[in-house]
Image: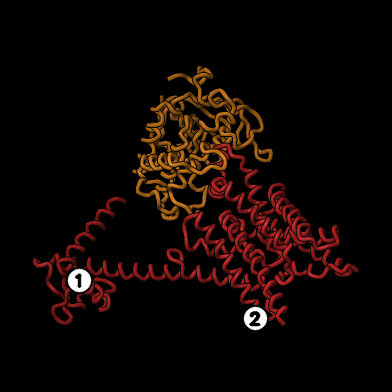
């Protein structure tokens, strides 16, 4: 595998340079450099408050950074909005909202539909296909408040899929799902990667890191380490990232 | 005499049309206000609009409806901006910001109103109807302005339907797709301010917040579909407007606006209690059947325990034996099971499985067994 510092900009889906983000003068992200190559499955890992969600949001242009640059496929974010798919944390929305699963998935098409227009028959067809891919075909007309946590997560995944993007950002897709759903989701993410799409995932479980992901970024306000899972996941790096509590997090640290 | 009846009908039809417009516009927008958890913002806006009305009157020295509405619109809008900036730039919480803006603006409005009361102009009568609402002061020109506002609200809602839906459901996803979220939020808030302002004369500053909560709260009980909810909220608003107008017309000395609020509150109570799926009655019934079901299942399981000690699974036992090994079996539940043809009692106080009941007990056991092994 290529070392991150050897990557040319052309090979990259995302190039982040010197990114610093601050909320009311308190830095949340400090001087982040990140080159994400095309066609990889990348995990962003770090403790609570490390700035993982903030990093995703800054790359997508939802937060204005205090300093630094972000390029998506060599262009500005504004020019590449349509190439981005996003799966926010499940807890960020009100699941008692009066609508059904299909309608939520269809929201993933809104960026393609354009102003004043309604979703077309084709948009509906694509959304039903996406629900089928996440194993939720039978739940299309199910009201949101009757979905379980795992089903909500699948609906959000389907919504990201219909965005038909080249670059996906997923914020904790495995939180609150059972083992079966977790497997189904990771299979889909690997499938996306195999279609040479780039998938960036905020992840929490160090145990599954090596099985699921190609690349990993250890983050705690600063980027502690970045590269292939085998290179990065060392006890020293984990100790720096989690501050000495890492022995609880991992029973068998990868030692290279 | 004939002229009297005619003029009464004219007033009534004006008022009726007014409650119609008020009901639709506040009903439709209340859905978004409630779903965006901004129902209290409605109360703030209506109070914040009040000094705008008095200032506009002081500026024009007439009660020109367009001018008064415009004043209310601007000052209501300034109120919402103030709430937002207080939350952004200070450490005060949202409810504190609401309280500050509401009381300061309303106080200012009252001060200006008392100043106007002492002015020697003749046109000032009826300004205090904005406080508690008075439909009888409604004129055709007021109606035209209300209709115009309502039309604008409905057109914009139609144009930006999918954007407003997404804005209400998932702002962060929306901004990830590059939609101008802040501008759309501003547009929806302006429409909300318009809906509130157009009802002030009829319902009044104090009660207007009810119109921005009640129709949506009632409508949400009946449907899980946004389009239907918005339509239903508009319809509930309209219906309450009409009923309230008729009732207040039938009973002398009862003002229309407050009557509309009373009617719509009754509709909320009915919806909370009787709606299918979400209503209280429905929940009680569901809970009752759930309990009955659990009791029946546990009896079947206990009977299965007995049957395992005999070669004949259909062997009958006394009810007291079943009571001895498990909680709950009562004659009532046994009779229920018998009605479902799950148990038989060939003799008085002797109970045993039917073929159907034995099968059901076996599947129950199987499902319980597999569940306990999954976890």
| Mark 2 lies on residue | B251
Say which mark, if any, is on residue B341. 1
Q: Secondary structure at mark 2?
A: loop
- Chain for disc number 2: B
Residue lying at 76% horizontally and 55% vertically, measured from the top left: B70
- Chain for disc number 1: B
Identify the colour of chain A in the image: orange
Quadrant in which residue B365 is drawn: bottom left
**Label 2 vs 1, first from the N-terminus:** 2
Q: Nearer the viewer, mark 2 or mark 1?
A: 2
On the question of residue A8 being in view, the answer is yes
Q: B311 or B27: which is nearer to us?
A: B27
Q: Is residue B259 above or below residue B28?
A: below
Q: Is residue A134 above or below residue B360?
A: above
Q: Which chain is red?
A: B
- List x then y, in percent, for residue A233: 45, 29
Residue lying at 31% horizontally and 70% vertically, measured from the top left: B292
């Amino acid at each position: 595998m290529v070392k991150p510092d050897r990557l040319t900009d052309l090979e990259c889906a995302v190039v982040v340079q010197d990114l610093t983000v601050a909320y009311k003068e308190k830095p949340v992200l400090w001087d982040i450099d990140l080159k994400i190559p095309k066609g990889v499955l990348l995990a962003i890992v770090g403790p609570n408050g490390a700035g993982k969600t903030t990093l995703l949001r800054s790359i997508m242009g939802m937060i204005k950074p205090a300093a630094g640059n972000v390029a998506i496929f060599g262009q500005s974010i504004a020019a590449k909005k349509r190439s981005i798919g996003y799966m926010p944390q499940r807890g960020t929305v009100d699941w008692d909202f009066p609508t059904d699963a299909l309608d939520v998935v269809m929201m993933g098409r809104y960026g393609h539909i354009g102003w004043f227009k309604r979703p077309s028959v084709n948009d509906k067809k694509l959304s039903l296909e996406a629900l089928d891919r996440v194993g939720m075909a039978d739940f299309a007309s199910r009201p949101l408040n009757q979905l379980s946590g795992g089903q909500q997560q699948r609906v959000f995944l389907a919504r990201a899929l219909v965005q038909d993007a080249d670059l996906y950002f997923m914020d904790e897709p495995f939180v609150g799902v059972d083992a079966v759903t977790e497997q189904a989701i990771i299979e889909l993410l690997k499938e996306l990667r195999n279609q040479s799409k780039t998938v960036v995932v905020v992840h929490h479980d160090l145990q599954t890191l090596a099985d699921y992901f190609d690349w990993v970024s250890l983050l705690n306000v600063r980027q502690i380490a970045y590269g292939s899972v085998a290179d990065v996941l060392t006890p020293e790096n984990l100790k720096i990232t989690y501050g000495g509590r890492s022995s609880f997090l991992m029973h068998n640290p990868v030692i290279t | 005499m004939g002229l009297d009846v005619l003029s009464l009908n004219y007033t009534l039809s004006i008022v009726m049309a007014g409650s119609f417009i008020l009901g639709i516009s506040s009903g439709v927008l209340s859905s978004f206000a409630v779903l965006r958890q901004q129902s209290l913002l409605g109360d703030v806006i209506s109070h914040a609009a009040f000094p705008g009305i008095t200032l506009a009157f002081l500026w024009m020295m007439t009660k020109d409806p367009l001018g008064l509405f415009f004043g209310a619109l601007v000052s209501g809008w300034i109120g919402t901006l103030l709430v937002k900036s207080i939350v952004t730039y200070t450490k005060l919480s949202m409810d504190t910001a609401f309280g500050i803006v509401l009381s300061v603006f309303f106080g200012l409005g009252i001060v200006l109103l008392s100043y106007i009361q002492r002015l020697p102009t003749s046109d000032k009568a009826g300004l205090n109807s904005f406080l508690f609402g008075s439909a009888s002061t409604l004129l055709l020109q007021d109606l035209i302005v209300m209709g115009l506002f309502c039309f604008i609200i409905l057109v914009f809602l139609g144009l930006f339907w999918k954007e407003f839906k997404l804005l209400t459901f998932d702002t962060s996803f929306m901004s990830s797709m590059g939609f101008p979220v802040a501008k759309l939020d501003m547009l929806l808030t302006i429409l909300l301010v318009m809906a509130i302002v157009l009802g002030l004369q009829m319902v009044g500053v104090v009660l207007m917040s009810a119109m921005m909560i009640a129709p949506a709260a009632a409508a949400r009980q009946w449907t899980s579909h946004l389009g239907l909810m918005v339509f239903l909220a508009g319809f509930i608003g309209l219906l309450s407007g009409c009923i309230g107008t008729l009732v207040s017309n039938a009973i002398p000395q009862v003002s229309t606006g407050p009557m509309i609020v009373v009617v719509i509150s009754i509709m909320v109570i009915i919806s909370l209690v009787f709606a299918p799926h979400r209503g209280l009655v429905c929940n009680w019934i569901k809970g009752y059947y759930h309990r009955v079901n659990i009791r029946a299942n546990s009896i079947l399981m206990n009977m299965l325990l007995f049957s395992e000690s005999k070669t004949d699974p259909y062997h009958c036992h006394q009810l007291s034996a079943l009571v001895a090994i498990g909680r709950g079996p009562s004659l009532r539940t046994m009779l229920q099971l018998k009605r479902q043809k799950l148990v038989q009692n060939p003799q008085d106080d002797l109970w045993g499985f039917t073929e159907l009941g034995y099968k059901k007990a076996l599947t129950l056991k199987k499902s319980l067994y597999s569940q306990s092994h999954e976890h």
